[in-house]
Amino acid sequence: MLPQGSKLYSILFLKCPRCHKGEFFTANPYKLSNFNKVKERCPKCHLKYSIEPSFYTGSMYVSYGVGIAVAVAAYVLTLLFGLALSIGTLFIIIVTALVVTMPWIAAVSKSIWANIFFNFDKEIAQKINSK
């Protein structure tokens, strides 16, 4: 399992980039009524998640890369399973994989974007643990 303190932990588990304790989103990415809604502040360390208005607009660039990774993974999985599929079938499989993972891709992209600008603070995490 990933240790707390690594950026990968914060990204994959959608936790606060500074303390790795608080939730980053208001709800699960697949709860479409609150689709991709980032909390204003961390409930544990009170970090303000948005540095400026439209802060998460930059995560669109990250989501492109994550989407490409998902598409490549879908293609490689078809190769690993030894499926000899036509181009049209591969296209449908990749598009389906992208549509199904779209909420997750958007959430992880915002988490990656936040982790670029915020760093883990071990002292704050220890203070939260001691409470």
Image (spheres, rainbow, N blue to C red):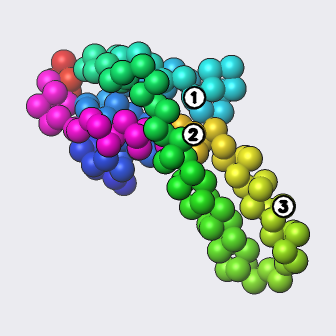
Q: Is the magenta stretch mostly helix, strand or loop?
A: helix
Residue 115 numbered tag: none
| Residue corresponding to mark 3 | 92
Q: Where is residue 60 in the image (x, y as percent from the top left)?
A: 54, 41
Any part of residue 42 in sight: no
The percent coordinates of residue 71 (x first, y second) are 66, 62
Tell me the element at label 3.
helix
Q: What residue type is labelled 2?
A: Ala
Residue at point 18%, 18% (across, down): 131
Query: In this view of the protein, which residue sits in the foreground, 39 or 5?
Result: 39
Label 3: few (<14), some (14–19) or many (≥20) C-alpha neighbours in 10 Å: few
Which residue is located at x 57 percent, y 51 percent? 64
Q: Name the residue under label 1.
A: 36
Q: Mark 2 to mark 3: distance in Å?
A: 21 Å
The secondary element bearing badge 1 is classed as loop
Residue type at numbered disc 1: Asn
Task: Provide the residue span drawn in magenta.
Answer: 109-127
In magenta segment, residue 101: no
Residue tagged 2: 106
Q: Determine whether label 1 and label 2 are within 8 Å by CB.
A: yes
